[in-house]
Image (cartoon, rainbow, N blue to C red):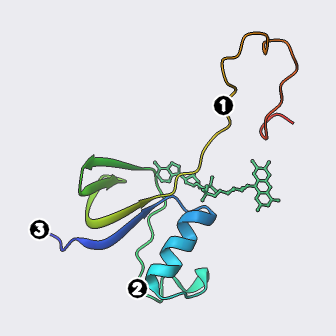
Amino acid sequence: MAKPYDLVVVGAGSGGITAARTAAGCVPSKALLAAGVDVRIAAAEFVSPSAVAVDGEVLRFRAAVIAIGSEPAVPPIPGLDGAGVVTSDTV
Ligand SMILES: Cc1cc2nc3c(=O)[nH]c(=O)nc-3n(C[C@H](O)[C@H](O)[C@H](O)COP(=O)(O)OP(=O)(O)OC[C@H]3O[C@@H](n4cnc5c(N)ncnc54)[C@H](O)[C@@H]3O)c2cc1C
């Protein structure tokens, strides 16, 4: 069985990149590969408390950072419907 990763970072936005860079020793993001960081470009799915599945491959880890971003949500407040509420996605 493959050796577990010390850290798996899910999400490559500003949060995930910063986490990976910091863990790898503050290298520029373009140098992540040279710093020994394995990069997978695919959606990750947690399959256990210590493993993610990516592109059919199961990666075990000691720690994980979940940095998958967020999306705007409009709260269910009566009267908001039709009030012209905009979010960062619709403005
Ligand atoms: C319209 C708009 C304008 C903005 N303008 C600014 C600005 O001018 N200045 C500023 O500082 N901030 C700005 N922000 C905010 C900034 O974009 C966010 O704060 C920042 O991107 C959040 O980073 P994050 O890493 O948390 O998430 P994200 O950048 O959203 O990154 C999350 C990543 O995770 C990936 N992901 C999700 N699920 C999975 C999965 N299961 N497996 C693998 N990957 C996954 C997503 O594809 C994405 O690449 C703006 C946001 C919006 C919407």
Callout in the foreground (2, 1): 1
Residue 88 place in picture, x, y as percent: 79, 41
Please tell me whether residue 28 is drawn above or below residue 41 in the rendered image. Answer: below
User: Residue 77 sits in which quadrant?
Assistant: top right
* Residue type of the residue flagged with mark 1: Ala
In the rendered image, the residue lying farthest to the left is: 1
Within 10 Å of disc 2 (Cα), the crowding (few <14, some 14-19, many 20+) is few
Q: Earlier in the sequence, mark 2 or mark 1?
A: 2
Residue 36 badge: 2
For marks 2 and 1, give the CA distance. Answer: 37 Å
User: Circle 3 — which element?
Assistant: loop
Taking 40 as reference, is 29 left or right?
right
Q: Quadrant of ligand 1?
A: bottom right
Asked if disc 1 and disc 3 are in contact, CB closer than 8 Å, the reply is no
* Residue type of the residue flagged with mark 2: Gly
User: Residue 81 sits in which quadrant?
Assistant: top right
Q: Nearer the viewer, residue 59 or 82?
A: 82
Q: Residue at x 36, y 62 (%)?
A: 64
User: Circle 1 — which element?
Assistant: loop
Q: Which residue is mark 1?
A: 73
Residue 1 badge: 3
Residue 44 place in picture, x, y as percent: 40, 52
* Residue type of the residue flagged with mark 3: Met
In the image, the residue with mark 1 has its CB under 8 Å from the nearest atom of ligand 1:
no
